[in-house]
Amino acid sequence: MSMQEATTRVIYDVQSVFYDVTFGKLVRRHIRKAISHMDIQPSDRVLDIGIGTGTSLHFYPRQGSIVGIDLSGGMLRECRKKIREQQRDNVMVLQGNALDLPFGDDTFDHVFISHVISVVSDPFLLIREAQRVAKRNARIIIVNHFQSTNPVVAKVEKWLCPLCTKLGWRSDLPLGELIQRTGVQIDYRYKLESLDLWETVVICNNKSMLTGSNGGILAA
Ligand SMILES: C[S@@+](CC[C@H](N)C(=O)[O-])C[C@H]1O[C@@H](n2cnc3c(N)ncnc32)[C@H](O)[C@@H]1O
């Protein structure tokens, strides 16, 4: 595990105590809407990467098999409490690194990545791992803040980045670069409001990072 992941684990172990009443509250609406787009069938397997305290749990159906993974034992402790409270017997969570997923190729029908892509040390490797464990043409849904396309706002975001890093994420990840370097095929993307900080990006798994169909551009 990299130094950044080790630090991230500590940051989120601390944040787990107040996450649900702070950031978790702010992102609930986005998570609910994104999951409502998944159309999860009873035989489907869903992977929630960086499930955290399980804000998403309320919105998954009781059908299908939901697997959550997270680095932070503290975040998972809160998540397990919700699993018990909600008596969710179709949800399983485990501690692990999203950059080295402990699952076989082509396992999942849906992969959800909510507010994690700008937290990991290597977002391109995260996409590669998501593409590997997702079935071909499965949906990979990302909810995240991406760097603004407005140059002034983007400058402010770059300036704020060191502070954000201390809180456990980066504010300057450009979606354009992510698309260009990974070759992902975007089905559609949306914001809940025009001035929304967060965007939902729905990707159809074309396995581009595994087959070299990302225009020959190598991940970092
Ligand atoms: C901002 S929280 C998002 C939690 C949840 N997905 C949500 O939207 O409320 C980021 C989560 O990603 C987890 N995380 C960060 N890096 C990770 C990694 N390399 N592998 C697994 N989980 C990771 C953190 O522990 C934390 O729980």
Image (spheres, rainbow, N blue to C red):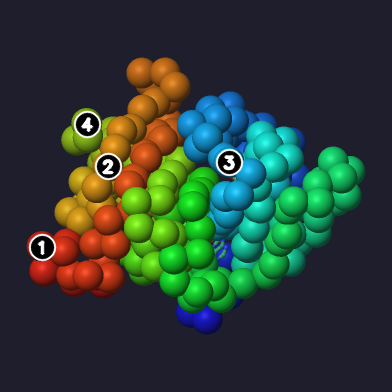
Q: Which residue is mark 4?
A: 150
| Residue 41 numbered mark, or none | 3
Q: Residue at the spot x=40%, y=34% of the render?
A: 199
The span from disc 4 to disc 1 (Cα, nearest Å) is 27 Å
In the rendered structure, which amino acid carries the disc numbered 2? Ile
Instruction: Indicate the secondary structure of the residue bearing disc 1.
Output: loop
Q: Earlier in the sequence, mark 4 or mark 1?
A: 4
The span from disc 2 to disc 1 (Cα, nearest Å) is 15 Å
User: In this figure, what is the number of numbered marks?
Assistant: 4
Q: Quadrant of residue 23?
A: top right
Report x, y in % for residue 201: 36, 39
Given this view, does label 3 or label 4 mark the residue nearer the observer? Answer: 3
Instruction: Indicate the secondary structure of the residue bearing disc 3.
Output: loop
The span from disc 3 to disc 4 (Cα, nearest Å) is 39 Å
Q: Which residue is mark 2?
A: 186
The span from disc 2 to disc 4 (Cα, nearest Å) is 21 Å
Question: As rendered, which of 106 and 186 lies closer to the eye?
Answer: 106
Residue farthest to the front, as pictured: 43
Q: Which residue is mark 1?
A: 215
In the rendered structure, which amino acid carries the disc numbered 3? Gln
Q: In screen coordinates, is 154 left or right of 111?
A: left
Q: In screen coordinates, is 108 left or right of 69?
A: left
Q: Earlier in the sequence, mark 3 or mark 4?
A: 3
The span from disc 1 to disc 3 (Cα, nearest Å) is 34 Å
In the rendered structure, which amino acid carries the disc numbered 4? Asn
